[in-house]
Amino acid sequence: MTARLFSDTVCTLGEGAFWHPERAQFFWFDILGKKLLTRSGDDEQVWQFDDCVSAAGWVDRDTLIMASASGLWRFEIETGRREKLIDLEADNPVTRSNDGRADPLGGFWIGTMGYNAEPGAGAIYRFYRGELRKLFDKITISNAICFGPDGDTAYFTDTKDGCVMRVTLDADGWPDGDPQVYLDLRNEELGADGAVIDAHGNFWNAQWGASRVACYAPNGTLIETRAVPTPQASCPCFGGSDLSTLFVTTAADGLSGDDMAGKTFAIDTNVTGQPEHRVIL
């Protein structure tokens, strides 16, 4: 169950790992390269943009919602056409989008951060049925946005802070009450980056600087780790025919002499992930 090379395309900052359940197709981003990538069979396709893009969710078989530095977009896979849905900190040149994922009720959560990780410059938002609402602010590096299989729990982190938070959601998917600490990683020599929850409620976290994805039980106990052959693991997702393959993006930014840095990997597991949730526009 070692990591195998899935794509040898080098991403400066790989992110936004995402499995489209209707297309049975993997998508990912190079944020700093301003690219959306996908692979179907042996064919890899790249869309180049003029601004940073970072995360997506599926609307239907041929349509994604996609986050960029300045907005949320409706993106047509077959034509490459995109149409802006709503501005996202478009008047703030300091920030860009970062980690994001769809929630079980059809909302899309997206985090922002400063291009240079300016302290407290970012926030986390939810886009739901046409409304974009700020949920949490004063975040330096937004990450680990994911959702429990019961649909009433969300997770997120400020990588700079070192604590993964957990918050209860109400019947419409909005946070209900204050977030509580789920994992305290402040004494670890790593950064909690992107994350995903499997069908059993376990939390799989790509850990920047640690060359691994770590799996934690709902109570926060470390269950296992899966090695990635480069230090900067950035975002995982489950995919494949039975949702048991763990795809992991990485980043080459700041690394030299590492032939694996920035490439994308796949790990066979003995667990099942949740299907990515559909976004309702």
Image (tube, rainbow, N blue to C red):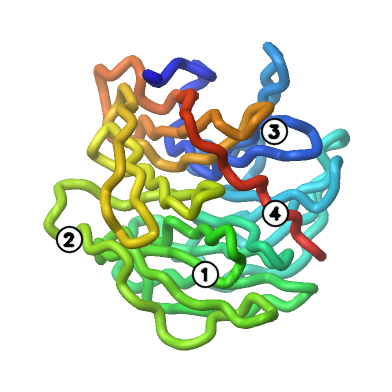
Can the viewer see residue 129 in this picture? Answer: yes
Q: What element carries label 1?
A: strand
Q: Is residue 224 above or below residue 163?
A: above
Measured Cα–Cα span from mark 2 to mark 1: 22 Å
Q: Which amino acid does label 3 sit on?
A: Trp
Q: Which amino acid does label 2 sit on?
A: Arg
Image quarter hosting the C terminus: bottom right
- The residue that label 1 is drawn on is 153
Q: Is mark 2 on a helix, strand or loop?
A: loop
Image quarter hosting the N terminus: top left
Q: Residue 47 carries which label?
A: 3
Q: Is mark 4 on a helix, strand or loop?
A: loop
Q: Residue 277 carries which label?
A: 4
Residue visible at 86% across and 34% down in the picture: 78
Measured Cα–Cα span from mark 3 to mark 4: 23 Å
**x%, y% of residue 219?**
33, 62
Labels 3 and 4: the sequence-earlier one: 3
Measured Cα–Cα span from mark 3 to mark 2: 37 Å
Labels 4 and 1: the sequence-earlier one: 1
- Which residue is more in the foreground, 232 or 273? 273
